[in-house]
Amino acid sequence: MVMPETTTLEMLERHVLLGERHIERQREIVADFRHRGYRTDLAEELLDLFEQMQILHVAHRDRLLNSTQG
């Protein structure tokens, strides 16, 4: 199967959107664990990692946008 070509910006936008979904889902998991009385330390660490990665994805996208506008 041949994948359609995507631009770097499209790829970065996709990463940002997926990151938002992952973060939202992980927040739901943490809340569910808390509600059930489960340990949340590892789930919270993963959420923190997702949030750090999202910062990098957004910064990368924004750098590309700024470089194409200036």
Image (tube, grey):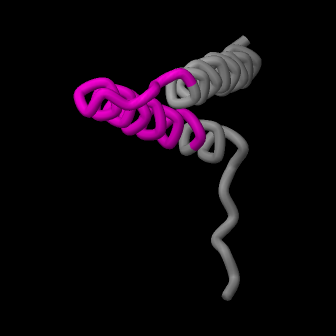
**14, above or below 37, in the image:** below
Whether residue 19 can be seen here: yes
Left/right placement of residue 46 relative to residue 33 reads right
**19, above or below 5, in the image:** above
Taking the spot 60% from the left edge, 45% from the top edge, the residue there is 10
Left/right placement of residue 68 relative to residue 58 reads right
For the N terminus, which image quadrant?
bottom right
Q: Nearer the viewer, residue 26 or 19?
A: 26
**Residue 54 position in % (x across, y down):** 59, 24
Q: Nearer the viewer, residue 56 or 64?
A: 56
Q: Nearer the viewer, residue 4 or 55?
A: 55
Report how many numbered discs are placed on residues in the image: 0
Q: Nearer the viewer, residue 15 or 49?
A: 49
Residue 38: name its quadrant.
Answer: top left
**Residue 44 position in % (x across, y down):** 51, 22
**Residue 15 position in % (x across, y down):** 59, 40
Q: Main secondary structure of the magenta part?
A: helix
Taking the spot 69% from the left edge, 49% from the top edge, the residue there is 7
Reply yes or no: does residue 26 show up in magenta: yes
Q: Point out the stretch of residues depicted in magenta.
A: 15-41
Taking the spot 55% from the left edge, 44% from the top edge, the residue there is 14
Whether residue 65 can be seen here: no
For the C terminus, which image quadrant?
top right
Taking the spot 64% from the left edge, 46% from the top edge, the residue there is 11
